Image (cartoon, helix red, strand yellow):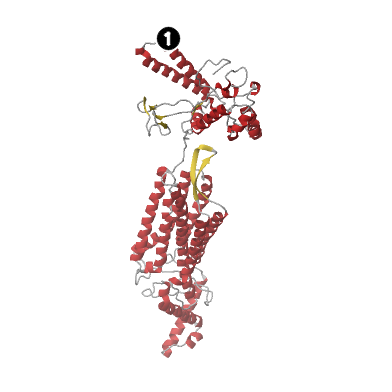
């Protein structure tokens, strides 16, 4: 009912009418009745675009009446209510001031003065309807002069409308007022023409289609004009979808895609190669070159590489192919597999070379020593145990988790990565780095100590090359990893290359030279061309290496002559020949020779060297298998 005269029996109007119906010049008094917006027994079928009867599926929120059946109500919150918003694109100071004002205006005390004014004073009335729980207190309306019965109807309608699952609000997005105006004008004009009979029945459908196309084009023009403005922060369509709660951001998740197969393919290749080398080691374990290279440790090196290669598989997993929980497991699996594999590889290499060092050091001192594989396993087992303990603490206390982050604060551009948690995970990862680098350093130290032993038994030369490769990869790869943290594809590629090069360098440089030497028939019985350089020990009575021929049939060792080009040795050799000639003459006269004859002939020094060499040959004949 509008105006001073009550000349309408039914109207759809704002809530303001309730607040004004008792104030002059209104004459309604207590004759006002309030009810929800009427419902309908029919609903639009979106597939056929026809009105059909309501049922439980089409109208899940409908109310069933005994006499008429299901009625679907859609309370309409016209105008959408009052709101207070703070721009996200202004300064922090202005945001704070605007927020304080919104809090003040919407507070209970201030808002109640406008929502529930004095019932008879129209001068202080505003268009604000209830928006707080405190605004639906029947007693407060009674105290301000409102009729209890009418007030109860009004508040009941408000509560029912706001709590309905079918509640409808008007369009709320930029340019909505312009679009609504176009819609209102077009619909009003069309209905006017229908009422006046200006559109024949046969043309009504085509006329509606024509009007629809015209409005659609006007809508597009309005929206395009708004979107193209420099001041536009959010496009109109996005704002509309956000307000409806149906907006889906067109996000670039930067998934790994097909690149994951790069790491997975090389992982398979590395595993196959490592298994092949392990099988070769097992099959040829009784061959001298393999036995001399200590088969157990060669197999352990293969096992370590298999673990490192396997880490490439969880490394290539992201939330494009797996769930959140599976991605969490993949984060931890990558750390477990790589750390165990790296330590197993280089700790085995350290133990292998360390055993050879101990045997040859004892041989240089003419000591009998037998160093079994078990004697040098403790360092390997210790490093592996420390790795497992640290990994267990990391897994149980503060594991890595898969998270998706925004790049440059752009919600449309995200990437997934394994997040390092608190202090425990940082500490454990740091210690794991120290342990694994220690295994690498120890392997290098032992390899350097065996630099004088030929490579049929020793890998020092090839380990050095492998270390150079690994150092170059680390020098380039690790800084790159920090630069590509927000680029999953680049990070996967760099990390995969590091693992692949480390694994291949160890396999190729440890096994390929041995296989080539083995296939060429090296270190066979009776083959004295295959030799090992053995540096003289300080305890010997000379500074040059002695000429010692080992029994290659039993131990496969030959000590090379250290030939000298010093001209003084020519004179020494001539003098030696003279003394030997004199000693031969004495022997011919006496028919025998004794140590005194050597002393008399000035050859006592060479007699000591001969006895020294005989002892060394005897030692190697008896214990040489410990070296091999």
The residue lying toward the viewer, choosing from 312 and 200, is: 200
How packed is label 1: few (under 14 Cα within 10 Å), some, or many (20 or more)? few
Image position, residue 588 (x, y; %): 41, 87
Image position, residue 463 (x, y; %): 46, 60
Look at the picture and state if 99 lies above or below 469: above
The N terminus: image quadrant: top right
Image position, residue 416 (x, y; %): 48, 44
Image position, residue 427 (x, y; %): 56, 56
The C terminus: image quadrant: bottom left
Look at the picture and state if 379 lies above or below 330: below
Look at the picture and state if 422 lies above or below 179: below
Mark 1 lies on a secondary structure that is: loop
The residue lying toward the viewer, choosing from 152 and 405, is: 152
As drawn, which residue projects farthest toward the bottom?
590
The residue lying toward the viewer, choosing from 190 and 585, is: 190
Q: Residue at 54% of width from left, 74% of height from top? A: 538
Q: Is residue 601 left or right of residue 119?
A: left
Q: Is residue 136 left or right of residue 452?
A: right
Residue that badge 1 annotates: 196
Badge count: 1
Residue 91 seen: no
Residue 531 seen: yes
The residue lying toward the viewer, choosing from 143 and 587, is: 143
């Amino acid at each position: 009912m509008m105006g001073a005269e009550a000349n309408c029996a039914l109207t759809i109007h704002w809530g303001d009418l309730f607040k004004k119906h008792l104030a002059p010049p209104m004459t309604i008094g207590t004759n006002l009745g309030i009810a929800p917006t009427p419902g309908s027994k029919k609903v639009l079928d979106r597939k056929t675009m026809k009105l059909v009867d309501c049922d439980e599926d089409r109208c899940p929120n409908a109310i069933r009446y005994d006499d008429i059946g299901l009625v679907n109500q859609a309370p309409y919150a016209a105008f959408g209510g009052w709101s207070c918003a703070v721009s996200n694109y202004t300064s922090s100071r202005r945001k704070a001031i605007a927020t304080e004002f919104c809090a003040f205006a919407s507070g209970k005390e201030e808002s109640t003065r406008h929502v529930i004014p004095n019932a008879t004073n129209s001068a202080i009335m505003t268009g604000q309807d209830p928006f707080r729980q405190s605004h639906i207190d029947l007693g407060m309306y009674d105290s301000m002069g409102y009729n209890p019965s009418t007030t109860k109807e009004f508040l009941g309608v408000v509560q029912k409308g706001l709590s309905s699952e079918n509640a409808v609000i008007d369009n709320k997005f930029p340019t909505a007022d312009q679009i609504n105006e176009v819609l209102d004008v077009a619909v009003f004009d069309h209905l006017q023409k229908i009422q006046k009979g200006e559109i024949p029945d046969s043309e009504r459908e085509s006329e509606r289609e024509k009007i629809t196309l015209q409005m659609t084009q006007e809508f597009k023009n309005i929206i395009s004009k708004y979107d193209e403005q420099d001041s536009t922060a959010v496009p109109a369509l996005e704002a509309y979808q956000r307000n409806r709660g149906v907006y889906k951001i067109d996000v670039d998740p930067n998934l790994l895609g097909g690149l994951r197969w790069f790491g997975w393919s090389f992982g398979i290749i590395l595993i196959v190669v490592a298994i092949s080398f392990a099988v070769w080691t097992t099959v040829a374990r009784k061959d001298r070159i393999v036995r001399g290279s200590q088969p157990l440790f060669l197999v352990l090196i293969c096992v370590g590489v298999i673990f490192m290669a396997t880490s490439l598989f969880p490394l290539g997993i992201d939330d494009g192919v797996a769930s959140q929980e599976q991605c969490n497991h993949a984060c931890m699996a990558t750390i477990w597999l790589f750390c165990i594999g790296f330590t197993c590889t280089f700790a085995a290499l350290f133990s292998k070379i360390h055993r050879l060092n101990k045997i040859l050091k004892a041989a240089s001192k003419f000591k009998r020593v037998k160093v079994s594989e078990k004697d040098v396993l403790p360092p390997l087992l210790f490093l592996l145990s420390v790795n497992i303990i640290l990994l267990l603490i990391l897994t149980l206390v503060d594991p890595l988790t898969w998270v998706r982050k925004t790049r440059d604060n752009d919600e449309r551009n995200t990437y997934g990565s394994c997040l390092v948690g608190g202090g425990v995970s940082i500490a454990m990862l740091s210690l794991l780095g120290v342990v694994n680098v220690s295994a690498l350093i120890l392997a290098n130290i032992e390899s350097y100590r065996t630099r004088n032993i030929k490579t049929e038994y020793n890998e020092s030369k090839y380990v050095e090359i492998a270390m150079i490769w690994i150092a170059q990869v680390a020098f380039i790869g690790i800084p790159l990893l920090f630069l590509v943290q927000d680029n999953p594809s680049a990070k996967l590629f760099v990390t995969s290359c590091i693992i692949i090069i480390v694994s291949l360098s160890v396999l190729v440089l440890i096994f390929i030279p041995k296989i080539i030497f083995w296939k060429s028939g090296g270190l066979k019985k009776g083959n004295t061309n295959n030799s090992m350089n053995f540096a003289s020990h300080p305890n010997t009575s000379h500074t040059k290496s002695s000429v010692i021929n080992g029994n290659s049939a039993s131990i496969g060792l030959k000590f090379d002559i250290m030939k000298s080009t010093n001209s003084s040795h020519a004179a020494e050799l001539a003098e030696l020949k003279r003394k030997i000639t004199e000693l031969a003459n004495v022997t011919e006269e006496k028919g025998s020779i004794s140590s005194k004859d050597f002393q008399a002939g000035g050859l006592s020094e060479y007699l000591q060297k001969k006895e020294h060499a005989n002892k060394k040959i005897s030692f190697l004949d008896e214990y040489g298998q410990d070296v091999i």
